[in-house]
Image (cartoon, rainbow, N blue to C red):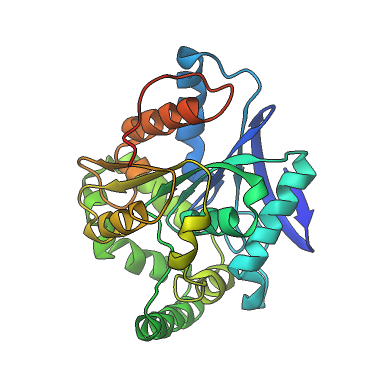
Amino acid sequence: MRLTVNGAGYNVEVHGDGPPLLLLHGFTGSTRTWDVHVQRIRALAPAKGGWSGHSIVSVDLLGHGQSDAPADYERYRMERACEDIDAVLDTLGHGRAAVLGYSMGGRLALHLAVECPERVAALVLESASPGIADPMERRHRAERDEELAMSIEREGIPAFVQQWQDNPIFETQRVLPEAVRTALRSQRLNNSPIGLANSLRGMGTAAQEPLWERLGAVEVPTLLLAGEHDAKYRALLEGMWERLPRVGAAVIPDAGHAVHLEQPEVFVHRVVEFLWGQLPGWNSREEIEWR
């Protein structure tokens, strides 16, 4: 469905009724990121006590998929994105949501928990970061992101996608089945140059407020996921583990940055077991590793 919130058009997909699990994709992604996972979650849920009374909501973030791609990069900032997600939930008639975010979507999910805690019932953060604490490192990252944004605008999406998929962080994806890699490339190509460029400028890791010192205020149950072969995000997971009050964590074997893509069945089982254990009406009793 198409929703207009705060003057911007969003593509939103809803499966089922009731309190939602909100899915937030990463940079270059879209609602298509979650197609297989929605099916798997809904298929697994009945075995864990039934899906009755719950829904899954996924959103194309600004500049991605079928949502708007404003010309002003300020419109993409995390604060505005939180306001938009808040308005989407209002429009759909939801009060609180369990929120699952991957990479950029994980950063947004964490911001939502800090800025709008009344909206978040639980968090699943996959390969996510609270931001860059060091000002010098943040400045250098901002410079690199601006160079990449200008390249996207100058060279176009196909050239950027070729460059992006050669990023070392995605090295482990080269062994995925051809059909999976083709679908991922198609998803990345289905974005606009201005949308991706401005997403980097307004919502990139360097553009966001670092949240390291605010993690202690995140009171909802939180599950951290990272891939075994993603050393950078395993380290970030360990750092967040030390600061979040109600946190569980899992490092997924034989996976890199995109755990949901590289180990989809393990990913879905972890998410469902966590939600069933932490939220009223999701009745699993399986234990998650908690600090």
Q: Residue at x 34, y 40 (%)?
A: 179
Asked if residue 197 is positioned above or below residue 117 in the image, the reply reads below
Q: At which x and y percent is residue 31?
A: 55, 46
Q: Residue at x 34, y 49 (%)?
A: 258
Image quarter of residue 52:
top right
Side of 198 relative to 132 (left or right): right
Image quarter of residue 13:
top right
Q: At which x and y percent is residue 225?
A: 35, 45
Asked if residue 14 is positioned above or below residue 234 in the image, the reply reads above
Relative depth, front residue between 210 and 28: 210
Q: Pick the quarter of the image with the N terminus.
A: top right
Side of 30 relative to 222 (left or right): right
Residue 137 seen in render: yes
Q: Residue at x 51, y 32 (%)?
A: 38
Q: Residue at x 27, y 47 (%)?
A: 227
Asked if residue 167 is positioned above or below residue 188 in the image, the reply reads below
Side of 161 relative to 92 (left or right): left
Side of 208 relative to 57 (left or right): left
Q: Pick the quarter of the image with the C terminus.
A: top left
Residue 190 seen in render: no
